[in-house]
Amino acid sequence: MVKCYKKFVCLIVSAVLVNVFMLYSPCSALTVELSWNASTESTLAGYKVYYQADSSTLPFQGTGALEGAAPVDVYNWTTATISGLDPDRTYYFAVTAYDINGLESSFSNIVTVPGSASSAFSSGDINADGNVNVADALLALQVAVGKVAPDSGQLGRGDVAPIVNGTSQPNGKIDIGDVIVILGKVTG
Ligand SMILES: [Ca+2]
Ligand SMILES: [Ca+2]
């Protein structure tokens, strides 16, 4: 049983890569479509979609989607639609697979869907005074070392890193990487 589980985990980690598409419906609720590569495990029984707002800490235990609280069991579909989400919040998604014995794989890669509010203001201007300067870098540093607990607005504005392919990919926290990016903006 243990051997089976390990093999299963390995396959899934390499096989489940989540792609994401965002749809904004007229009522301004956020709908996210996820798809992933099928597992080749012969004992595969299905997949579970985990989601959570504002925090990238696993396991995701989000609530509020029309499909129900995380995890959402999507059986053996390799796509999922999670709807009714708050478009102003940043959501994190991950998928697991489970086999016919109910054993669950580890999590797939995490997909981040930045909220409209946080992506609009994720400039590094943590203190929201209209400028990115050394005061913001200092505040980011204080958050990064745990001296200041950021509120959700500060987190959204200061979470500028990591930078992937030249684009900001907020990861739900302010750490030293964010401090460096903000300092880079300050020093030009
Ligand atoms: Ca500022
Ligand atoms: Ca960050």
Image (spheres, grey):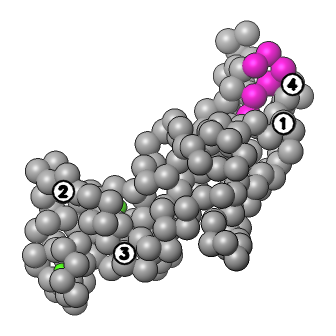
**CA distance separating discs 4 and 3:** 43 Å
The front one of 185 and 48 is 48
* Image-based side of 58 in relation to 78, left or right: left
Q: Is residue 168 above or below residue 1?
A: below
Q: Is residue 156 above or below residue 36?
A: below
- The residue carrying pointer 2 sits among few (fewer than 14), some (14 to 19) or many (20 or more) residues within 10 Å by Cα, namely many
> Which residue corresponds to the image point at 67% horizontal and 30% vertical from the top-left?
105
Residue at disc 1, secondary structure: loop
> Which residue corresponds to the image point at 84% horizontal and 29% vertical from the top-left?
44
**Can the viewer see residue 17?**
no
**CA distance separating discs 1 and 3:** 36 Å
Decide which of tag 2 and tag 3 comes sooner along the chain. 3
**CA distance separating discs 2 and 1:** 41 Å
What stretch of residues is rendered in magenta? 97-102
Q: Position of residue 166 (x, y in %)?
A: 46, 79
Tag 4 residue: 43
Number of numbered labels in the structure image: 4
Q: Are marks 2 and 3 in contact (CB under 8 Å)?
A: no
What's the amino acid at mark 2? Answer: Val
Tag 3 residue: 122
Residue that protrudes farthest toward the right in the picture: 42
**Can the viewer see residue 142?**
yes
**CA distance separating discs 4 and 2:** 45 Å
Q: Are marks 1 and 4 in contact (CB under 8 Å)?
A: no
Q: Position of residue 180 (x, y in %)?
A: 23, 70
Q: Is 100 one of the magenta-colored residues?
A: yes
**CA distance separating discs 2 and 3:** 15 Å
Tag 1 residue: 75
Question: Mark number for residue 143?
Answer: 2
- The residue carrying pointer 1 sits among few (fewer than 14), some (14 to 19) or many (20 or more) residues within 10 Å by Cα, namely some
Q: For the C terminus, give its image quadrant.
A: bottom left
> Which residue corresponds to the image point at 26% horizontal and 58% vertical from the top-left?
151
